[in-house]
């Protein structure tokens, strides 16, 4: 996955007054966590930040944070929003290193012309994402789930999922990922239909 550049600026350690001034100036406060080392207080333009994620439509978009000639490769950890306006209030990021494994949540994407849906059932997704361990540069955009041959009342289970190249799933108890719900449609046998016609 190619990283997307985002220009940031350093700021003083977090305090309410400083955060209000930043927001008034059109910036949003953020913190970069570096795994065992001191965190970094930064700020950036929230409009640019949101435009990046609208374009990629991927929660795991790698950000190349640029400031004073230095770059940091980061993933978004948490975004805090105003409960009413949904404006971004604060962002937590964590720095990653190329070649070092990370654990991320990757969305599932149903693929295929589902047999059970063609028979009148309804596809029900029971799991929205899975935890994946991989290198930052190999984070998949989605995890495809083939539902082509999934009939009514059948399931795709976690144990049937195949991790993309360069990725592994966290070992865990097996569970259902997706199913098709609805009544099975059974075709009447020709002989039975003929018997009914003769009685009439």
Image: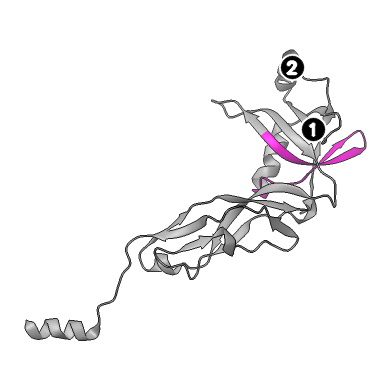
Residue drawn where x is 49% and y is 52% of the image? 126
Outermost top residue: 17
Residue 187, percent from left and from top: 28, 76
Viewport quadrant of the N terminus? bottom right
Q: Is residue 178 left or right of residue 139?
A: left
* Badge 2 or badge 1: first in the primary sequence: 2
Closest to the observer: 166 or 170? 170
**Is residue 65 one of those drawn in magenta?**
yes
Residue 89, percent from left and from top: 66, 26
Q: Secondary structure at mark 1?
A: strand
Residue drawn where x is 93% and y is 37% of the image? 69
Residue 77, percent from left and from top: 70, 37
Outermost left residue: 200
Callout 1 environment at 10 Å: few (<14), some (14 to 19), or many (20+)?
many
Residue span colored magenta? 56-78
Dominant secondary structure of the residues highlighted in magenta in the image: strand
Viewport quadrant of the C terminus? bottom left
Outermost right residue: 69
Callout 2 environment at 10 Å: few (<14), some (14 to 19), or many (20+)?
few
Which of the 4 image quarters holds residue 18? top right
How far is mark 2 from mark 1, CA to CA?
20 Å
Q: Secondary structure at mark 2?
A: helix
Which label number is shown at residue 21?
2
Residue drawn where x is 60% and y is 62% of the image? 161
Answer above or below: position of 168 versus 103: below
What residue is shown with label 1?
A: 32
């Amino acid at each position: 996955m190619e990283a997307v550049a985002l220009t940031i600026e350093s700021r003083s350690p977090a305090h309410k007054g400083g955060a209000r001034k930043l927001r008034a100036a059109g910036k949003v406060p953020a913190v970069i966590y570096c795994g065992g080392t001191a965190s970094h207080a930064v700020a950036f333009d929230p409009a640019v930040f949101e435009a990046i994620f609208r374009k990629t439509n991927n929660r795991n978009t790698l950000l190349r944070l640029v400031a004073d000639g230095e770059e940091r490769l980061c993933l978004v950890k948490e975004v805090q929003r105003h409960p009413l306006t949904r404006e971004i209030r604060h962002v937590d990021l964590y720095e990653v290193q190329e070649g070092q494994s990370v654990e991320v949540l990757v969305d599932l994407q149903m693929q295929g012309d589902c047999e059970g849906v063609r028979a009148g059932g309804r596809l029900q997704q029971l799991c929205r994402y899975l935890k994946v361990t991989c290198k930052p540069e190999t984070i998949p955009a989605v995890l495809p789930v083939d539902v082509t041959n999934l009939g009514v009342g059948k399931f795709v289970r976690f144990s049937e999922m195949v991790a993309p190249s360069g990725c592994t799933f966290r070992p865990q108890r097996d569970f259902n990922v997706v199913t098709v719900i609805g009544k099975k449609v059974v075709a009447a046998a020709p002989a039975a239909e003929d018997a009914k016609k003769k009685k009439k």
